């Protein structure tokens, strides 16, 4: 007697921001190693960045006509019911045609209808929730999902406790070992190895408030013998690239070699997106979080507090930026504080997240 080898078809749905796309791609890459013959299909939202980033990573993607409901009264909300109907209809068509073994959602507009339809059709589903405070979509989907992989403690307040597994968030593999790369990083960025380096990360598009803060304090930083690696984001690069002329200041629209960026850093200023936080826990350097106040459910502040409450980082709200010089001065002049922050943030790292999530997906496949 012999058995037919089971064909494995996997749908992944996540997008809108890099924080939803890159975890999905990391999970797909790990699954591909385990199941080289598997078929993969991503489902995203039309006109969002996943429609570009996922094909760049080598995967096929289909777009749904879907966007979020605006919180204030706006004409865009009139099209929302039609978008919702369209996305459910097309998600149904896609799932029936592709016949997935399992459907994985990493957040974003498209994952709602995709996982909802999969649940209705009796297909196994897994949610990967990056944030310490989940959005409405994942709260609703969690009731029918088979497994929910999370990165923070305390999410049984929102999800069924028996489905939760604390795995952490997938991170880029090259970040798992930056030890011994400092020399290479100093040469790569043409930095002075005798000076301390501050790295500024405001997300791939950039953060207006952080850029304005650095502009206001750049002379003070240089005067204090701090060299600056400044990712302005592509939206703001043309406005701030002039500061490249200052000695010890390097501006970039986007930093591609994040392994070397982190290796060069002595201190970091960052937004508090879930993926950034997961990376910074692994990197283990002193960090000041400046959360975006414009994110749904104030996710970023809640993410940052999960680290700050464990004495692993400093929180500086956008409403408190006038205290920056005092806060940064305390940090750079106190080595005991630096070591404490590094040790505590590193203790929160979950470097095996991708592998652990894939183990749970394998259980659903078999």
Image (spheres, rainbow, N blue to C red):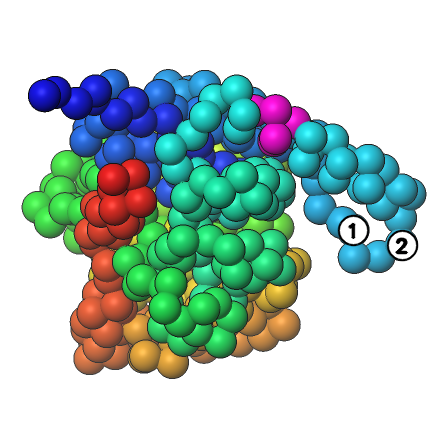
Residue 270: image quadrant is bottom left
Q: Are marks 2 and 1 in contact (CB under 8 Å)?
A: yes
**Label 2 vs label 1: CA separation?**
7 Å
Check if residue 92 falls in the magenta segment: yes
Residue name at image x 49 percent, y 37 percent: 13
On the rendered structure, is 39 left or right of 52? Answer: left
Taking the image as drawn, is residue 53 in sight? no
Q: Position of residue 318 (x, y in %)?
A: 59, 67
On the rendered structure, is 187 left or right of 271? Answer: left
On the rendered structure, is 156 left or right of 94? Answer: left
Q: Is residue 360 above or below residue 159?
A: above
- Residue where numbered disc 2 is placed: 73
Magenta stretch: dominant secondary structure: helix
Q: Is residue 58 above or below residue 132?
A: above
- Residue where numbered disc 1 is placed: 70
Residue name at image x 38 percent, y 63 percent: 163
Q: Quadrant of the N terminus?
A: top left
Q: Which residues are magenta?
A: 90-94
Taking the image as drawn, is residue 229 in sight? yes
Looking at this view, is 86 or 241 the one in front? 86
Secondary structure category for the residue under label 1:
loop
Q: Is residue 151 above or below residue 259?
A: below
Secondary structure category for the residue under label 2:
loop
Residue name at image x 35 percent, y 21 percent: 39
Check if residue 98 falls in the magenta segment: no
Residue name at image x 13 percent, y 42 percent: 181
On the rendered structure, is 319 left or right of 152? Answer: right
Q: Quadrant of the C terminus?
A: top left
Q: Position of residue 3 (x, y in %)?
A: 17, 23
């Amino acid at each position: 007697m012999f058995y037919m080898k089971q064909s494995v078809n996997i749908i992944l749905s996540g997008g809108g921001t890099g924080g939803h796309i890159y975890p999905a791609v990391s999970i797909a890459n790990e699954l591909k190693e385990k199941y080289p013959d598997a078929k993969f299909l991503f489902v995203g939202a039309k006109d969002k960045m996943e429609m570009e980033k996922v094909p760049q990573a080598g995967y096929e993607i289909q777009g749904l006509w879907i966007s979020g409901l605006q919180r204030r009264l706006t004409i865009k909300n009139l099209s929302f019911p039609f978008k919702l109907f369209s996305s459910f209809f097309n998600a149904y068509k896609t799932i029936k045609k592709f016949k997935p073994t399992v459907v994985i959602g990493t957040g974003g507009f498209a994952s709602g209808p995709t996982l909802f339809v999969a649940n209705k059709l009796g297909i196994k589903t897994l949610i990967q929730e990056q944030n310490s405070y989940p959005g409405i979509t994942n709260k609703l989907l969690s009731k029918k999902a088979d497994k929910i992989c999370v990165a923070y403690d305390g999410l049984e307040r929102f999800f069924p406790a028996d489905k939760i597994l604390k795995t952490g968030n997938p991170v880029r593999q090259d970040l798992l070992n930056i030890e011994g790369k400092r020399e290479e990083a100093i040469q790569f960025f043409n930095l002075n190895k005798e000076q301390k380096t501050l790295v500024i990360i405001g997300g791939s598009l950039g953060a207006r408030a952080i850029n304005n803060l650095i502009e206001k304090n750049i002379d003070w930083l240089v005067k204090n013998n701090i060299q600056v690696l400044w990712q302005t984001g592509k939206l703001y690069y043309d406005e701030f690239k002039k500061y490249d002329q200052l000695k010890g200041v390097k501006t970039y629209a986007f930093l591609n070699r994040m392994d070397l960026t982190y290796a060069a850093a002595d201190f970091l200023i960052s937004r508090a997106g879930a993926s950034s936080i997961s990376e910074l826990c692994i990197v283990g350097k002193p960090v000041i979080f400046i959360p975006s106040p414009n994110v749904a459910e104030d996710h970023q502040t809640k993410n940052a507090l999960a680290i700050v409450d464990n004495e692993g980082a400093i929180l500086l709200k956008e409403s408190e930026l006038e205290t920056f010089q005092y806060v940064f001065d305390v940090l750079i002049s106190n080595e005991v504080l630096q070591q404490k922050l590094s040790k505590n943030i590193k203790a929160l790292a979950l470097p095996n997240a991708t592998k652990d999530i894939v183990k749970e997906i394998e259980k659903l496949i078999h």
